Amino acid sequence: MRRLRWLVAIAALGAAVYFFPRPFLYRLGAYLVKADGPVKSDCMFVLAGDFNGQRIMKAAELYRLGMAPKLFISGPYGIYGRSEDELAIAFAKANRTEDVPFIPLPNHGRSTVTEGLEVLPRLRQEGCRSVLVVTSDFHTRRAGRILRRIWPDLQVRIASAPTVDYDAERWWTNRNYQKTFFFEWTKTAADWIGL
């Protein structure tokens, strides 16, 4: 009898999520998004990993608003023999940002942790005591947690760039959104357990 009650409860919960997904699934998707309001900082830093240009274009917009006098673009190597910062800056310049003085920051990072650790000495050298980090909306919570942990002497604020690959309001309705949700939650869980 007890087993039957559990099965009925699980079936009811499954039916509720299936027929009324928004109240349940929205919270899971929205959890990933946790950005600070853009605040004036010593430097701005654009995390790598956006191949559509939203991060660098958002950073250019924030630069024009006077959020930071220095704008660093992270760029791991390995994209057909070029670094990501090189490609991102070329994209931005081709899209009316000639007035923005992007500072390339090539590196060998392959994760938010390794990228952050590798660029930290350069940020310190440039006098960055406060850093406004620009990343995709779905990456804001995890990036903020990681960078605050590995940059303990810097004041880190996170700015959110929109993305074509995710919508927290309806992530379960589109295959690309679902993949972004799955991978970001996997990486979030891995960070929680120290992987």
Image: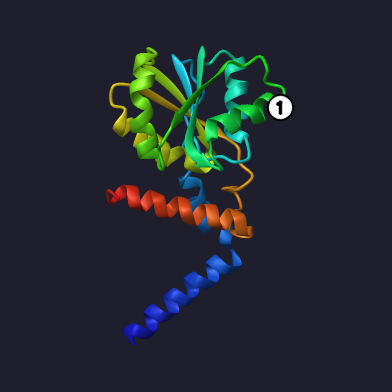
Going by the image, does 102 lie left or right of 45? Answer: right
Q: Position of residue 91 (x, y in %)?
A: 66, 31
**Residue 47 in view in this figure:** no
Determine the image quadrant of residue 156. Answer: top left
Write the residue at 51% across / 53% down: 181
Going by the image, does 147 lie left or right of 66? Answer: left
Going by the image, does 101 lie left or right of 34? Answer: right
The residue carrying mark 1 is 94
Q: Position of residue 129 (x, y in %)?
A: 36, 16
Write the residue at 28% across / 51% down: 193
Q: Secondary structure at mark 1?
A: loop
Write the residue at 58% across / 17% down: 63
Q: Is residue 7 above or below residue 82?
A: below
142 or 80, which is in the foreground? 80
Direction front: furthest residue: 81
Q: Position of residue 79 (x, y in %)?
A: 54, 42
Q: Quadrant of the N terminus?
A: bottom left
Direction bottom: furthest residue: 1
Q: Position of residue 98 (x, y in %)?
A: 68, 17
Inspect the image, locate mark 1, and give the three-letter code of the amino acid beneath it: Ala
Q: Is residue 147 above or below residue 32?
A: above
Determine the image quadrant of residue 64. Answer: top right
Q: Is residue 158 above or below residue 22?
A: above
126 or 160, which is in the foreground? 126
Write the residue at 37% across / 12% down: 127
Determine the image quadrant of residue 2. Answer: bottom left
Circle 1: is it few (<14), some (14-19), or many (20+) Cα within 10 Å?
few
Going by the image, does 193 lie left or right of 186? Answer: left
70 or 66, which is in the foreground? 70
**Residue 5 in view in this figure:** yes
